Amino acid sequence: MSAVKELLRTEENGKLSFGDHTLTTKAKKDDFPYEGDVYKVKTFSEITKLEKNGLFLYESVPGTSVNNFKEDVNGISFTVEGPDDAQITLGLLEDTDYAVIVDHKDTGHMKTNLGGKLSISVELGTAPVNIKVQKA
């Protein structure tokens, strides 16, 4: 697994991959159709952002590369990688309790704020990390 050189793509398994944490300058890809929605990604070494229909969905600081991203009514799952630890913020349902699973280990429950945002810190650098955030 590595940076997504196309910036945003659909995988053979139907999931999204996006972001290129190796870029030194900002890059973006707009108007990407996926399952009836329109996605936009902005990415480089300092930040990666994904929007769906103009609404916030994912952000990492510093920038990351994300593979096999899938969002459904129960939450979000993906694999993330980057050279340094990252702060990841997800756009979910507001005021909702979620179970957060990092590399198949339950890290506990977190509740989104009134804006629906949930933030987690992830240790990166050696291998890709699997993230799963599900409604509790």
Image: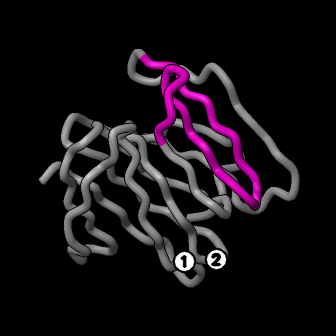
Mark 2 lies on a secondary structure that is: loop
For the C terminus, give its image quadrant.
bottom left
Q: Residue at x 76, y 53 (%)?
A: 44
* Numbered badge on residue 68: none
Magenta part of the protein: which range? 37-57
- In-image side of 77 versus 2 (left or right): left
Name the residue carrying label 2.
84
Of residue 94 and residue 58, the one placed in the foreground of this image is 94
Name the residue carrying label 1.
124
Q: State yes or no: discs 1 and 2 in contact (Cβ < 8 Å).
A: yes
Vertical relation: 100 (above or below) 17 = below
For residue 27, which quarter of the picture?
top right
Structural distance between the alpha carbons of marks 1 and 2: 5 Å
What is the magenta segment's predominant secondary structure? strand
Compare marks 1 and 2 and give the one earlier in the sequence: 2
Q: Residue at x 44, y 19 (%)?
A: 37
Residue furthest out toward the front: 114
Residue type beneath disc 2: Asp
Of residue 125 and residue 57, the one placed in the foreground of this image is 57
Vertical relation: 55 (above or below) 22 = above
Q: Residue at x 33, y 74 (%)?
A: 103
